[in-house]
Image: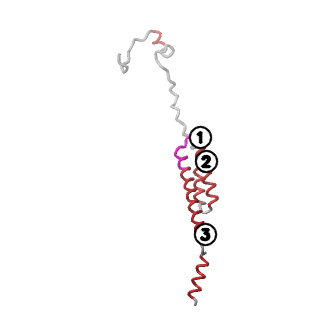
Amino acid sequence: MDDNQTVQRELTEEEKKNPVSSGAVEWHDPLDKPVPQQKTRPGKLAIASVLLGLAGICTSCAAPAAFILGIAGIACGILSDTAHENSDKLRKIGILLSAAALLTALIVLIISIVVNSGSQKISDYYQTFEGSAGV
């Protein structure tokens, strides 16, 4: 017999009198409404990861603060994954922003080291330039 075909049978007298209690018909309350699925909120750790990443990028000129905020943002993103929060996209964005904060802080730190480690300072350069032009 095919699964798509349903077999029709005659109801007995008892089933005709009480179709629900006899099990012939399934009863549904007409006032029952389908329960809407609750929207899950993004996890708090994932939101913290995004905020820390943004703060780290904003403070990238102050390298120590950006390093601390970037590392904290990456840690929150990883902890969000291990806590099984429903925030996969937000977690990834937070980790990427935090990594960008670390990278920009590292670039700013390298540039400041290179500029400050030169043999001459800018003021020394101007003094030598003025001395040679004033002769």
- Residue 47 badge: none
- Residue 117 badge: 3
Q: What percent of the width, then of the height, locates residue 22?
A: 49, 13
Q: Could you say whether the residue bearing mark 2 is in a helix, strand or loop? A: helix
Residue 111 sits inside the magenta stretch? no
Q: How far is mark 2 from mark 1, CA to CA?
A: 11 Å
Residue type (three-letter) at the residue carrying disc 3: Ser
Q: What percent of the width, then of the height, locates residue 3?
A: 37, 20
Stretch of the chain drawn in magenta = 81-94
Discs 3/2, front = 3
Q: Which residue is mark 1?
A: 82
45 left or right, relative to 22: right
114 left or right, relative to 8: right
Up-down relation of residue 56 to residue 119 (above or below): above
x 55%, y 49%: residue? 95
Q: How far is mark 1 from mark 3, CA to CA?
A: 43 Å
Residue furthest out toward the front? 119
x 55%, y 57%: residue? 103
What secondary structure is the stretch in magenta mostly built from? helix
Q: How is the image coloured?
A: secondary structure
Q: Quadrant of the C terminus?
A: bottom right
Displayed quadrant of residue 121 = bottom right
Q: What percent of the width, then of the height, locates residue 67?
A: 62, 56
Q: What percent of the width, then of the height, locates residue 46?
A: 58, 46
Which tag, 2 or 1, sits closer to the chain's start? 2
Discs 1/3, front = 3
Q: Are marks 1 and 3 in contact (CB under 8 Å)?
A: no
Residue 90 sits inside the magenta stretch? yes
Q: Which residue is mark 2?
A: 75
Q: Are marks 2 and 1 in contact (CB under 8 Å)?
A: no
